[in-house]
Image: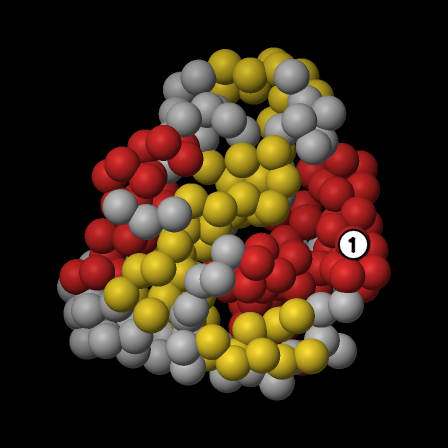
Amino acid sequence: MGVMTETAGTPQPTAPAAEHAADRQRLQELISELAVVRGKVTLSSGKEADYYIDLRRITLQHEAAPLVGRVIRQLLAEAGIDYVAAGGLTMGADPVGTAVLHAAARDGAATDSFVVRKAQKSHGMNRQVEGPSVEGRKVVVLEDTSTTGGSALTAVEAVRAAGGIVQAVAVIVDRDTGAKEHIEATAGVPYLFAYSKNDLGLD
């Protein structure tokens, strides 16, 4: 269990360095082992690549999912990001947000999650952002990985329309395909990532 520190209203984890390093190393191993699929693929952006990173094989896996929550929490803490809820566009972001929620509970912090629909509901409460209200609250938009930044930006727009105050966008793996620059220029918030493609030995 990490020691809690207080920053601008939201407790942030300060996991012991050895524990954090072990979490990062093990998650990196699991990503390389389980999520990197070699071979020619066409990405959602239409671009071709020699590999595909299927991070749902990590975010929905029994050992890796808790590590995802802890590593993302530590990433945000090290960047000094203040937030009370985390989530993103369904469905890639859904298990990431849930992992962060559970990691926060483990650390004794009250962090909610939310799910952004791809389109606003046309019935019921007509919400696009599901879960506890984000209105007037500091939030982080999550994604498992991003090629162009489009999914994260859709989530940012929806969250802002719902009154949320977006503090940052955070992803597990950055593919170095321009998402960081696009998101930071368009949304005006920091883009953080836990692992680069170089960390995973990908060209």
- With respect to residue 44, does 155 lie above or below? below
Evaluate whether residue 164 shows in this view: yes
Give me the residue at 17% from left, 61% from top: 161
Q: In the rendering, at what x and y percent does residue 64 appear?
A: 73, 55
- With respect to residue 143, does 149 lie above or below? above
Q: In the rendering, at what x and y percent does residue 79 appear?
A: 51, 56
Instruction: Name the colouring of the figure.
Output: secondary structure
Q: In the rendering, at what x and y percent does residue 106 appear?
A: 67, 79
Horizontal placement of 13 versus 169: left or right?
A: right
Q: Which quarter of the figure has residue 96?
A: bottom right
Evaluate whether residue 37 shows in this view: no
Give me the residue at 69% from left, 79% from top: 3
Task: Name the quadrant of the C terminus.
Answer: top right
Horizontal placement of 82 versus 49: left or right?
A: left
Give me the residue at 33% from left, 39% from top: 183
Disc 1 marks which residue?
21
Q: In the rendering, at what x and y percent does residue 168 appear?
A: 39, 54
Label 1 crowd bin: few (<14), some (14–19), many (20+), radius 10 Å: few
Q: Which quarter of the figure has residue 9?
A: bottom left
For label 1, the SS is helix
Give me the residue at 63% from left, 21% from top: 51
Horizontal placement of 29 versus 144: left or right?
A: right
Q: Which quarter of the figure has residue 53?
A: top right
- Seen from the viewer's position, the closer of residues 74 and 125 is 74
| Amino acid tagged 1 | Ala
